[in-house]
Image: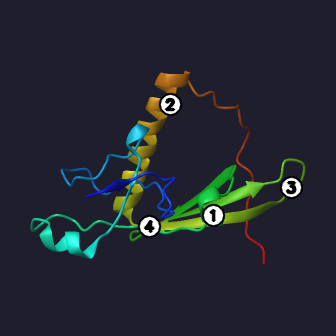
Amino acid sequence: MKLRDAQSANNTVPFLNAPAGDHGLPRAGGADYGSVEWNPEEKMSQPIGTPPQVQIKADEKELLGQYSNLVLIYHNAEEFALHFVYVFPNAPQGKLVSGAILSPGHAKRLWRALGENISRHEAQFGPIRETPQGPPPQVGFIQ
């Protein structure tokens, strides 16, 4: 399995790992972010039970990401939906900038990976201060 840097010419991007275990992929968080390249010839030589290598392609706009200062989270028995919103600082309005729908298992892995990364960040840079907040804003979608 070949790990590639996020800056490679192939436009591969960093990823969060799948379920924890001995699957040969880097764990989420810290310096071991990476991406993997899928090579069909290599797949044939991999031992049975080894997950295939995945190459993720993204253009520059996707790599830049979107800033969000509010996340709306909804869930039911089958999925978690995350809506990332940018609320304008001096106006009572915002814009949906991105969304993701996750299985409950992946949502829990994301929660765990965020917790690990927040712990590492605070160990390196000190505690993250949360700004005091009043009651949550009344938010609704319009078309």
Q: Are marks 2 and 4 in contact (CB under 8 Å)?
A: no
Q: Nearer the viewer, mark 2 or mark 4?
A: 4
Residue 142's disc is none
Work out whether mark 3 precedes mark 4 in sequence or the reverse, and give the earlier one.
4
For disc 3, the marked residue is 92
For disc 4, the marked residue is 56
Res 17 visible: no
How far is disc 3 from disc 4 in space, using C-alphas? 37 Å
How far is disc 3 from disc 2 in space, using C-alphas? 32 Å
- Closer to us: 109 or 10: 10
Q: Are marks 1 and 2 in contact (CB under 8 Å)?
A: no
Task: Relative to 22, say whether 43 is above or below.
Answer: below
Disc 4 residue crowd, few under 14, some 14–19, many 20+, Cα 10 Å? some
Task: Relative to 15, say whether 28 is above or below.
Answer: above
Work out whether mark 1 precedes mark 2 in sequence or the reverse, and give the earlier one.
1
Residue 34 in picture, x, y percent from top left = 40, 51
Res 134 visible: yes
Q: Are marks 3 and 4 in contact (CB under 8 Å)?
A: no
Q: What residue do we see at 28% from left, 53% from top?
A: 25
Which residue type carries mark 2?
His
Residue 121's disc is 2
Q: What residue do we see at 73% from left, 60% from top?
A: 139
Work out whether mark 3 precedes mark 2 in sequence or the reverse, and give the earlier one.
3
- Closer to us: 135 or 116: 116
For disc 1, the marked residue is 60
Residue closest to the far bottom: 143
